[in-house]
Amino acid sequence: MIITNQVFYIIILLLLIVLFLQFFISNNNTKERIKILLEKQSIIEQSISDLIIRNFDKIDSKFDKSSFENHNNLSQIREKMSLIDRAQQNISSLTENVVDLKNFLSNTTQRGRFGEMLLENLIKDHLPKDHYEFQKTLSNSSRVDCMIMSPGSLNKTCIDAKFPKESFEKFQKSVSKDEKLKLLKKFKSDIKNHISTVQEKYLISGETSDIALIFIPSEQVYLEIFRLFPELSETFYITKVFLVSPTTLWIILNSIESLIRDKKIQNNATFIFQHLKELNTELIRLESRIKKMDSHFSNAQVDLNDILITSKKISNKREKLLKLDDSN
């Protein structure tokens, strides 16, 4: 816009020059006027030349600035494209990992191991090492995934981590209503059979706790069981085998952790009380011995006083004898 205005001014100046030329040529005193005109023309030309130079300088400056900004913009675009490429690579890698995890969880044995690993991490994060044991073999040769040792009725509680959910996964993928109903019945039957298996293996009188837990590593499956089969709650209380999710197990472990802490405080309090009783006995004994020693000191003081009196009497007699010797 500025350059356009300046070109307009240049055109105006050229028109003025032409008008001045016509005006002076039309008069008689042409020499003087032509001289003046030439001088003014020279000044105007110089002004125009300076104006053009300044404009070109401004154009060069703006061009340089625009080139620099374009270069910076291109550099930023390259950097952002590089970031996008890296993000795309990360997304591709993440997609591969998700696919691997899906394949991993689709295998029954591997999924069971996944549940065991999650269970182990939860247990290790909340309980001291001497209050749990993994893969413990019981007297009936059954191997439990985890046994928790704690004060109270939850001592030696067995936790199973091999919950069967194949039928539930098939139920989720199914589109047929009849097939869904069939798979739901199968899933309910699998749950009951697994509860019976856990009850038979892990509820041993005098060896384990009165209850056992079945760990479900998925909150969604846990909630769906109670939504689809609310009547199973009665089965849980009858068999004393209960389902737990990561959240409910976390609550149970916090309660057990509090029981362990309270038990330690109680044991420490008993230990301290016992030592205080022994300390009191020793203090009584010390007091008796101090009194006895004081009695000995009192008797010794009396004996010492008697010795001093006898010594004084001997000294007096010796002085009397010495005086008799001096008089003779």
Image (cartoon, rainbow, N blue to C red):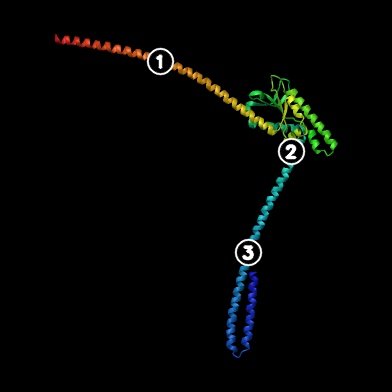
For label 3, the crowd category at 10 Å Cα-Cα, with few meaning under 14, some 14 to 19 and many 20 or more, is: few
Q: Is residue 75 left or right of residue 293?
A: right
Q: How many numbered marks have been drawn onto this rendered protein structure?
A: 3
Label at residue 101: 2
- Residue 90 image position (x, y, % from top left): 70, 45
Q: CA distance from mark 2 to mark 1?
A: 81 Å
- Residue 266 image position (x, y, % from top left): 57, 24
- Residue 310 image position (x, y, % from top left): 27, 10
Foreground: disc 1 or disc 3: 1
For label 1, the crowd category at 10 Å Cα-Cα, with few meaning under 14, some 14 to 19 and many 20 or more, is: few
For label 2, the crowd category at 10 Å Cα-Cα, with few meaning under 14, some 14 to 19 and many 20 or more, is: few
Pick the quarter of the image with the N terminus.
bottom right
Q: Secondary structure at mark 2?
A: helix
The residue drawn where x is 32% and y is 12% is 302
Q: Which residue is mark 1?
A: 291
299 and 141: which is toward the camera: 299
Label at residue 64: 3
Q: Is residue 110 visible?
A: no
The residue drawn where x is 22% and y is 11% is 316
276 and 115: which is toward the camera: 276
Q: Is residue 293 left or right of residue 225?
A: left
* Amino acid of disc 2: Leu
Q: Quadrant of residue 107?
A: top right
